[in-house]
Amino acid sequence: MLPYKHEPFTDFSKEENKKAIKEGYKIVDAYLGQDFPLIVGGERITTESKIVSYNPAKKEQVIGKVSKASQEIAEKALKIADETFNTWKKVKPEVRADVLFKAAAIIRRRKFEFSALLSREAGKTWVEADVEVAEGIDFLEYYGRQMLRLKDGQPVESRPGEYNRYDYIPLGVSVVISPWNFPFAIMAGTTVAAMVAGNTVLLKPASTTPVVAYKFVEVLEEAGMPAGVVNFIPGSGAEIGDFLVEHPRTRLISFTGSRDVGLGIVEKSAKLAEKQIWIKRTILEMGGKDTIVVDKEADLELAAQSIVRSAFGFSGQKCSAGSRAVIVEDVYDQVLARVKELTEELSVGVPDEDEHYVGPVIDGSAFKKIMGYMPVGNEEGRLITGGEGDDSKGFFIKPTVFADLSPTARIMQEEIFGPILGVCKAKDFDEAIEIANNTEYGLTGAVITNNRMNIEKAREDFHVGNLYFNRGCTGAIVGYQPFGGFNMSGTDSKAGGPDYIQLHMQAKTTSEML
């Protein structure tokens, strides 16, 4: 087997790649507006109640109408997953990993189709979509190899006349609740991590982006996944989300989403249901309010570029987005002026061509929420640029910068999840780190400095799960920068890391007297 290396990104300056993604759009457009069923135990189930997925850049364009699971169907899916677990857990780890490797190969061949689908359904630009598809492939390749590494357990000591083993066994039925902002990569990664470990899965994708999840389950089927291993059951959180979390046969909940929903899952999963015989395990990634710190001893052009890219990539709709910049006062005005220039160079528009850096936000409710912060920012600080939105044809918001903010301002504390950057001043590097730590989150952060001692201070004192030096705070690579945060950012489960698969298993010790 080839050693793991992350999937290379596509160079869209090459004409052949531009042509390839346009062909991808043609493939996707041919199935736009279709009805997509549930998949339960391999059976296609169509319901009258539908989730309608729209293109956020062209809000009247229907991506697909996806059947919506009822509580009755969710119960059926859980029963099938529970039954299938008895056979899937006994399938050799090598065979389970082979499904992932085959799926990776299929997606690699269909990379431009999946990128185009992400562009249509989530409003991603070519680059953002391509990077996400690459990340999904990485999860498949990396987790497959990690399972092969773990299949024989861990070494333990034995004594004369005694043979001891330490093996990993799967947990059971896993409920995977995936987000809309990385509807392919995170959905795929959380699903196959549970699956390759020998668990069965109930996949409940985000209601705004269910079509890409359906297409992924089709790929798993093509790759040889047996029926019932992954069951595709989109539906409302109120109707089936809580039901699945609270069900006594649910063993693991893997969730990516908001802080409030994540905390609700922790609370609900902790309550003992009738006939429940285990403590449910949770894996939670819940968001961030991420800071880029700029020292006085820094490459100021690099600082400004890093701030803008981190703040406005995918319209700031990343839990890792650099939505805060804390700049030491000695270079504050200079960096802020350059941030303004770079931000105003960014174009906003429909991502059908590779001409815009910023696409739409995901839907009307997100648009309304984000625009609701504009008067807040004007009251708390100084508007540097942006502040405008247009939802007449799609949900577009200009990249917005508010400066001169207090560290405790709402713009500096609340996860807005949109293209709004808050900037504040620190008297020195020590204060900048203090400000960086003053949120309830602890996901990502970055420090721009040429001072080695300040790098080491930040390495120790900047309390985030993913800390970057002299680059932006987004763009973690599977296997290179395992991803997960502290505090209210979640359980620090480190997706794409060497211990992630263990979270989906439990260790069993056996001891034989010889």
Image (cartoon, rainbow, N blue to C red):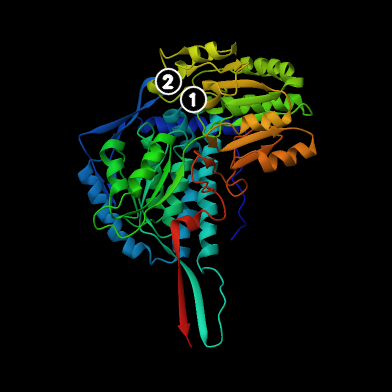
Q: Give the residue drawn at x 31%, y 40%.
A: 234
Q: Give the residue drawn at x 26%, y 55%.
A: 80
Residue 241 vs residue 425: left or right? left
Q: Position of residue 434 (x, y in %)?
A: 65, 32
Q: Which residue is mark 2?
A: 369
Q: Amino acid at mark 2?
A: Lys
Residue 259 vs residue 161: left or right? left
Q: Which residue is mark 1?
A: 416
- Identify the secondary structure beneath mark 2: helix
Q: In the image shown, does 406 or 202 lie closer to the viewer?
A: 406
Q: Residues within 10 Å of mark 2 (few under 14, many from 20)?
A: few
Q: Position of residue 196 (x, y in %)?
A: 44, 57
Q: Position of residue 147 (x, y in %)?
A: 51, 60
Q: Give the residue drawn at x 44%, y 60%.
A: 505
Q: Is residue 166 visible?
A: yes
Figure label count:
2
**Marks 1,2: beta carbons within 8 A:** yes
Q: Quadrant of residue 8?
A: top right
- Identify the secondary structure beneath mark 1: loop
Q: Is residue 13 visible?
A: no
**Label 1, label 2: how many angstroms apart (C-alpha)?**
8 Å
